[in-house]
Amino acid sequence: MAWLDALRGIAALVVMFEHASYSFMPEFRQELMPEFNTGRYGILVFFLVSGYIIPASLERRGSVRTFWIGRVFRMYPLWATAIAAVLAVNLLGLANMRDFGNQSTGTAAVAHAGLLQELLGTPSVLLVLWTLSYEMAFYLLVVALFTVRLHQRSAAVAVTLAVLAAVSVAAGITLPDAALSGLLGTGLLIGLASGALVVAICCASAGSPALRVFGGVLGGVLALVLVPFNGTVPVWEGLIILAVMFLGTAVHRAENGQSSWWRAGRTAAVVVACAVAGAYWNSDEAPFTRQGWIVAFLLAVVTFGIALALRHRRIPRSLIWLGMISYSVYLLHPVLLAVSDGTIGRWPQDNPVLVVAFFAVLLPLCALTYRYIEAPGQAWGRKLARRAEPSRRTPAPQVRPKKPPIRPGNPPAARHTSQPTARHTAHSIAPDRAEVQGDVSVGS
């Protein structure tokens, strides 16, 4: 799985550079962005990686309960650290926190707690947190398909979502940002959605099969309602984001023999065609934005394909290390940029030296947060998951009865030996793959 780490590392650096260019490379940014939207490129690579590995993580565990435990301890420790850092620098006057408008602090906090704030009409405390809302929607859909035993239909789900995205553009379906929040009221929607989220996760993690199905379906319906009808991106792009993640799942199934490469290729062709058509014909965007988005999307797919083709090659250790700390890079670089903007300000001309200096400060900081926050959080999650849902262990080999003593003068009696067959031996001594394969799933 080193190639996935490499992809995460590249994506995190690209997103970080895109945001740093506001402060340190404004001239270069002005020339590049109309041609290539670097932020969307990095985010789409992240979504493809998540789609590839997240459903596999759930299916390997075989338990919705342990899946959610793993997700909570993978995402929330660093998430809480980043938000605490934003609040701290805001109190110290080093940076200004984003304005929540007429929303109360309590409703904004509840919206953030479920990671769905971007789908609940609430501006994210950190701008980059918007992608976690779409990640959470994807998790809910993955759990829904798993509980109703349709998780193998990843390709069909990806194609359906992509076609719906294209149809929405062709039909001229446009909605204002957070349309449901405007209709029902932000506070009411946050209360209803947050309650449904808690019920969905708890029921899907229950022991009763009926409750699991109910919780899974409830979570899936919640995601399918919020993404197109209350997102901050256009309807077509929200659906394409989900389609891209399920495309990653379809590729994983083809690689592991659960599906054919021909099916994965057809799925990729449909998703790419619908995404490009949706971006090109979308009347809400300026022409240069369309071009920048399309180039970013195509390059993200090509990057993932190249990495997949080279997955058996040796991966540089530096890229693997960057992938390991990529979640820290993704969440912490906006905090550091906010401090930089609040102290030294933004530069009117390009200054590559400051970009290098920013890298030099950020990467060691992220190494520390990975070592002391992310890694312990994942370890606690694995420990709690083992307690909540003990893994199936290989049964101990049966002990043969002792041979009867041979008395002097009497030949040994013929005895029937029941030797295990090769198939039985292999089954009894080979550990289950789930016991030896580490958890490589990521948060973003």
Image: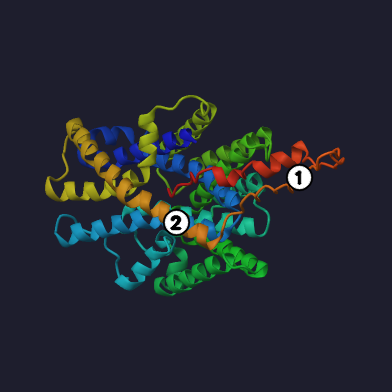
Residue 118 at x, y percent in the picture: 40, 59
Q: Circle 1 is placed at which residue position?
A: 403
| Residue at image coords 64%, 69% | 208
Colour scheme employed for the rendering of this structure: rainbow
| Residue 427 on image: x %, y % | 70, 43
Give the CA separation, mark 2 to mark 1.
Answer: 48 Å
Amino acid tagged 2: Gly
Q: Is residue 12 visible?
A: yes
Instruction: Say which amino acid is labelled 1.
Output: Lys
Residue drawn at the location 39% of the way across and 66% of the way down: 111
From the top left corner, tell me how far across and down residue 144 is, in percent: 60, 59
Mark 2 Cα within 10 Å, few/some/many (few <14, many 20+)? many
Secondary structure under the numbered disc 2 in the rendered image: helix
Closer to us: mark 2 or mark 1?
1
Q: In the image shown, does 314 or 395 lie closer to the viewer?
A: 395
Q: Is residue 232 visible?
A: no
Residue 425 tag number? none
Q: Which residue is mark 2?
A: 381
Direction from residue 314 to residue 83 in the image, left or right: left
Relative depth, front residue between 403 and 416 = 403
